[in-house]
Amino acid sequence: MASSISGNLGEEVARSISEESPSHYILKIQSFSLLIKNGIEKYESGEFEAGGYKWKLLLYPNGNKSKNVKEHLSLYLLLADVSSLIRHSREVHAIFRFFLLDQSKDKYLIVHDAKEEDRRFHRLKHQWGFDEFIPIRMFNDVSNGYLLEDNCVFGAEVFVTKEMSSGKGESLSMIKDAVSSKHVWKIENFSKLDSECHESQEFFAGDQKWKIQLYPNGRRNGSGTHISMYLALADTASTLMAGSRILAEFTLRIQDQQQNRHIAGKYSYWFSASNHESGWAKFVSFPYFYRSGIGFLVKDICMVEAEVTVQAVATTL
């Protein structure tokens, strides 16, 4: 037995009856009414595998309020492992069917797209389903057998029909009301520094870890004549996805400890895993830094400061 109705998005939705259980996933909910009573607007099931991918069911027991759904249950299929699609730049096409058990007759109501058209799951759209899966009044009607003794059983079948590579993409997030973070680095025994590069402790700015890099004998075209200084992203391998970039405006300073002034450099730069540092090879010349009467080095102590404001984050899609 089958019937079709017009769905709320204009698609044809088919409903049929079957004695066969769903082949991929069953979700049994006990004390269903407590979902609404306890203010649980949506329930996300555990993962299940079908067609080589992991999926979840997403149930709105009182309707999806974000879609302005009223007097209906909303039910969706969610691709659980979206990160795998992003990593491999893929999209998955699938046909799916939802099940609802009539416990009185031990038969399932099946709800699916009437045309059996596959749906495209990809990095920007990884959820499909029915806003108006079933009217709440019909679901609650004991004579239909869907909700008995406050228990119900949903199910799903998912058939992957096609897998395709998709083009590359990027998502840019500008940060509203970005907050700057300061970090002060006290370098003692400056004249005894014997390594090519010295690094500050890591500090946070814009949810990222940063560090200051100082080359007391210079670096690149500043080698032997200038102190070189850079701001660097810390631990890029674990904090940045491949292709991701961070726009940061930063200022590096060496403080004059006697006259309350400083040497400063200010710059904006897109940081990434492959370009994780920016700064100046010729930050300050040796003659000016070591000049007597200027407080850049007092009792062999140098005070360095970084001020960082993360303004935008670009991530791969």
Image (cartoon, helix red, strand yellow):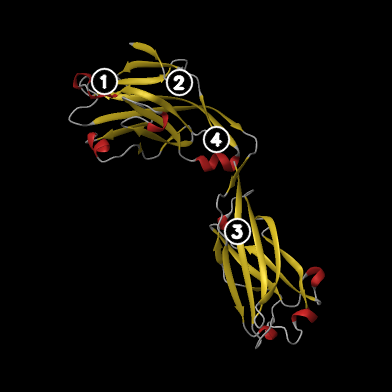
Give the label, 2 or 1, closer to the camera.
2
Q: N-terminal of the two: label 3 or label 4?
A: 4
Q: CA distance from mark 4 to mark 2?
A: 19 Å
Numbered label attached to residue 138 = 1
Which residue lies most toward the left here? 149
For the point 39% across and 16% down, which residue is it?
14
For label 3, count other residues whose C-alpha is less than 10 Å away and answer few (under 14), some (14-19) or many (20+).
some
Q: N-terminal of the two: label 3 or label 1?
A: 1
Q: N-terminal of the two: label 2 or label 1?
A: 2
Q: CA distance from mark 2 to mark 1?
A: 20 Å
Mark 1 residue element? helix
Q: Are marks 4 and 2 in contact (CB under 8 Å)?
A: no
For label 4, count other residues whose C-alpha is less than 10 Å away and answer few (under 14), some (14-19) or many (20+).
few
Give the label, 3 or 4, closer to the camera.
3
For the point 55% across and 52% down, which residue is it?
177
Numbered label attached to residue 309 = 3
Q: Is residue 261 left or right of residue 150?
A: right
For label 1, count other residues whose C-alpha is less than 10 Å away and answer few (under 14), some (14-19) or many (20+).
some
Q: N-terminal of the two: label 3 or label 2?
A: 2
Mark 4 residue element? loop
Which of the two residues, 253 or 232, is positioned nearer the viewer here? Answer: 253
Q: Which residue is mark 4?
A: 124
Residue 106 in picture, x, y percent from top left? 24, 22
Q: Which residue is mark 2?
A: 9
Q: CA distance from mark 3 to mark 2?
A: 43 Å
Q: Where is residue 74, by image quadrant?
A: top left
Give the label, 4 or 2, closer to the camera.
2
Residue 252 in picture, x, y percent from top left? 67, 68
For label 2, count other residues whose C-alpha is less than 10 Å away and answer few (under 14), some (14-19) or many (20+).
few
